[in-house]
Every structure is written in C-alpha cells, then in structure tokens.
Image (cartoon, rainbow, N blue to C red):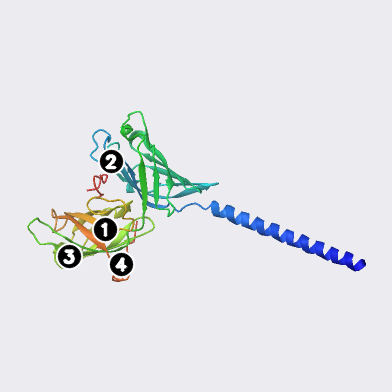
Amino acid sequence: MRLTAVLLCILFIAITIQAQQNSVTRLHFLESKEKQEDVHPNLAGMWNLRILNSKNMPNGQIEPTQFTFDIVPQKTDGSVQSLSNTGFEDYEFTSSVCVASGGGDHVNVSADSKGSVSFQVFVDNGESYSMTGVLSSDGTTVEGVGAQYVGKSGCGSADNGSAFVAMQYRPATGTYDGSFTSAPDEAPFAVRIQLKEDTNFNLTGTIRSSGNACFAGLEVNSDVYASLVSGNVAEFYGTDSNGDVIGFIANTGGPNDLPEDLDWHDFYITGVSYGGPCTGQSFSGAHFRKECPEMAEPQKDHPDDKGSSGQGYKAGNRP
C-alpha cells in the first residue's frame, strides 16, 4: 500500500512537471508568433507611385499622375511604422500638373504589420494625394483603389477614386552597356556606365567610351549638380578634367517606362552637355543593359562618394 502511494506521488509530480513544460512551450510559441506577426515590412528605399487613370487625367496633364520618391523610417508606434522623404524632398519627381516645379514636395508613408500601406503625397499649396493599399507578399508592390485628392483648388480631383500601384526599386548600382548617337546621321558609339548608389540615394561612378572624346574620362559625381536616384529615375552628371559637364536622365523599363523592371536591367538614357568643349551636344535616348554581376568588371569606389527623369517627369530647377 505504501509503495502504491509513493508511485502515485511520483506519477503526479511527473504529470505536473510535463504540464508546466507544455505551458512554457506554448507561451514561447505564442510570444514567437506575436513577434513574427509584428514584424514590419522593409519599405525604406526608392518608390514609383502611379495613379491608373489614363482616360480622365487632371486638366492640362499629358500623362497619368506619377510620383517618384525616396523614403526612410521615421518612427514605429506599436504595430505602425512611419516613413517619409524628409531630407530627400529634392529627390522627388512627378508628372503632376499640381506641382509647378516638377518635384521637391513632401511624402508620408505609414505601414502596419498586416500589410496595409498608406501614402500621402503633397503637391503645391499644401494640397495632397492620399491612398491606402495592400502590400504584396514579396514586399515590392502596393496596390489599391480609391485615391483621393485633398485641396480647395481641385487640381488633381480628376484622379479621385482611381486605382493605383506603387513599386519599390532596388539600388541602381551596376555596370551598364549601350550606345549613344550625337547626331541623326552619325554612327552610334559604344558606352559603358558604372554606377554606385550610396545609402543616401546618391550616385558616383564612371562613364567611358573610345568612340567619342566627350566620354573619354567622365566621372559621375555631385560636384556641379546632384547625381541621384529617385524611385525608378536616375539623374546624374559626368565631369572631366577638360571642363565637360554632361547631364543624363534615365529610367528603368525602356522607352515606354514599364514599371516592372525593379532591378534596373533595362536602362533608357538621354544626355545633354552643359559645359566644356562638348557644350551643346545632345545624346539621343538609348537602351543600356545591366550586366550580370559575374560578368561585370570590378567597380572602383569613387573618392567623392557624397551626398530625366523618365517619361513626362520634370526635374525641378535643374538644367
């Protein structure tokens, strides 16, 4: 009888310990699940936002409303993360007639851990576009409906209720091969462009060609004007020891500005010379293809790594 009581006591203790272990395991599982659910998507970076309204565009606008901008995290409040382009307002370009300068306005973005993302894009006179959509499973695309223009002027009210899509682009760092022509009757000459994008969306690099003296030794930098990336648009300047200054406007997705090229595989570039012996020359738009990483030559860091804008974009007050 005594032996039976001891065995029962041992069995009770074993059951109690197992129950406690199961409780701890379940608690850890729930904590892990809760943490996993509260992970915020990584939305910092370069974005292109397009309002899908080509039939009833705002008065005087020649193409659907688009904005390119670069955003960085500001704060996290519970399950909601806030981002904005604070400090990078000059890196915003747009096709909107509601922005006279073509860019330079403020953008606010908020996202929760469930994948809901809201955009507020300011235009002139404190007016703005607002819209909310759902983030794709791969974290690169936000789609939604019901874009709203808020402002007394009603400048962009034709876009009210429209669907929209916003896409996040990866850094433009890479080696690009293509060709330019400087006049309609001249043969194209091959050009290699090597770019490096830093964490502040600035570009440095080199532009080389043996087929045109203007491209013999161009260095991409921000010595004269800012060389930068905004969403799927790159605006950069090459200078050399002869005093040449050549500006380039580039966008992903080829001449039709297709939005799906998130990795900058198909670069469409035009160029104009603003200074030096090559002043006045223009270089017609051309395709540049991005080399695969294993094929590209090693890229040297530029010592001054400091800190067109696509179809229908206006690049502010830059030349």
Residue 64, which numbered label? 2
Instruction: Count the labels in the image.
Output: 4
Residue of label 4: 292
Q: Quadrant of the N terminus?
A: bottom right
Question: Which residue lies at the image location 23% right of the left edge and 50% below the top edge?
Answer: 256
Identified by mark 1, the residue type is: Asp
Q: At which x and y percent is residue 134?
A: 43, 45
Residue 290's spot in the image, x, y percent?
27, 63
- Residue 242 x %, y %: 17, 62
Horizontal side of 229 relative to 241 (left or right) equals right
- The residue where tag 3 is placed is 190
Secondary structure at badge 3 equals strand
Mark found first going from the N terminus, 3 or 2 = 2
Amino acid at circle 4: Cys
- Local SS, label 4: loop
Specify which label sits upstream in the sequence, 4 or 1: 1
Q: CA distance from mark 3 to mark 2?
A: 34 Å
Whole-percent x, y for residue 230 in the image: 32, 51
Q: CA distance from mark 3 to mark 4?
A: 18 Å
**Which of these two is toward me, 1 or 158?**
1
Residue at figure coordinates x 71%, y 61% from the top left: 21
Q: Give, as a three-letter code, the residue at label 3.
A: Ala
Furthest-left residue in view?
185
Distance between the alpha carbons at the discs numbered 2 and 4: 33 Å
Which residue position holds label 1?
A: 266
- Give the crowd class for mark 2: few <14, some 14-19, many >=20 residues within 10 Å: some
Which quadrant holds residue 60?
top left
Tell me the distance, in whole angstroms, between the alpha carbons under discs 2 and 1.
22 Å
Label 2 vs 1, first from the N-terminus: 2
Q: Which numbered tag is attached to residue 158?
A: none
Furthest toward the right, the residue is 1
